[in-house]
Amino acid sequence: MKKILQGLLLMGLVLMIVGCGANKSSGDSDKEQYTVRIAGGAVGPEHSLTKTFNFIKEELEEKSDGRFKVDLNVAGELGEDREIIEAMQMGGEVHLASPSPAALGGFNESVAILDMPFLFTNREIAYEVLDGGEPGQMILDGLESSGFKGLGYFENGFRNVTNNVQPIESVEDFEGLSIRTMQNQTHIRAWELLGGANPTPMAFGELYSALQQGTVDGQENPFGLILANKFFEVQDYLTVTNHVYAPNVIITNKEFYDSLPDDLRTIFDNAIQAAIEHNRELAQEEEVTARQELEEQGMEVYEFSQEQLEEMQEITLPVYEEFKDQIGAEVVDTFLGASRNK
């Protein structure tokens, strides 16, 4: 009996020591570990957005001393943008993502302003308008009613046109071409206005095979995505139009964000801000290197002159008025006032 009591006493002492050790590593309730499930969308592992999410994973885990555990999913592992947004909104199954404005605009119509043609004619204006005050913050604040916390903007680059029919050296050359677009009414309308092109909305995951089979003649995306998805294998011609600057809105589930302890929320916010700077450096570098590699892969590259770009801008200008009520007059006027006065 004495030995049993001694054994129980010893076991209790051991458990107490182990328990103290566990509390030191995982802490009290406010020191518990938080899983952050990131959905990187459909882009491949070498794309700047995927590299950005890898950067966030390292920042969160390192700066939190392991209290953040990041589950990173890329290359379509959790679906395309719309599926990811729904998973974040409905069940909080995704905690961090950066979808295209076209996809996010289906949940908050004001976001569609970010997809308008020639809204930003260079990235310096885009950074100033998105980061520097009312226009960019207006979009982020508006997402809260849909259950999201808007955190800022990553860069996906300027959109350019490829096709497999003919060189596009003027606006007139768009006529009759079937161009894959995102499932986005503003993009579709802009392409209808551009020389009688035939815009064909299609999911991104279906695009390569559609180009390969000739279902569509061409598509439009930033250089980095054209390269990462190997569209050069099924497209001969690339025309530099820079017709849309593509920012991706960084979002998290608002309930998840609000549940974070203050110190972890600060670490989370700081990681996002650091990632924005890192992403833009990557995107600018990618724009140069991806274009070079596309040329090396055999694509014939044509570049619209400033006069031709201004012609495209003038042709697509009616899109702003046509969608003003849907997006919101205040949003349209605020963005145009900020971007056109730079």
Image (tube, grey):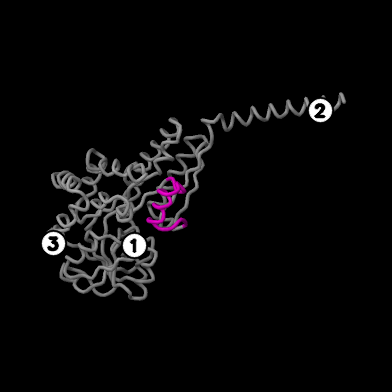
Q: At which x and y percent is residue 331?
A: 20, 46
Q: At which x and y percent is residue 29?
A: 54, 31
Is 162 placed left or right of 208 in the picture? left
Vertical arrangement, residue 22 with respect to residue 147, above or below: above
What's drawn in magenta, residue-wise? 77-95
Where the N terminus falls, by quadrant?
Answer: top right
Q: Specify the amino acid type for callout 3.
A: Ile
Q: Where on the picture, by quarter, is residue 190?
A: bottom left
Kindly identify which residue carries mark 3.
Answer: 315
Kindly identify which residue carries mark 1.
Answer: 226
Vertical arrangement, residue 289 with respect to residue 60, above or below: below
- Badge 1 or badge 3: first in the primary sequence: 1
Q: Specify the amino acid type for callout 2.
A: Gly
* Residue 194 highlighted magenta (yes or no): no
Vertical arrangement, residue 123 with respect to residue 44, above or below: above
User: What is the number of the mark on residue 7?
Assistant: 2
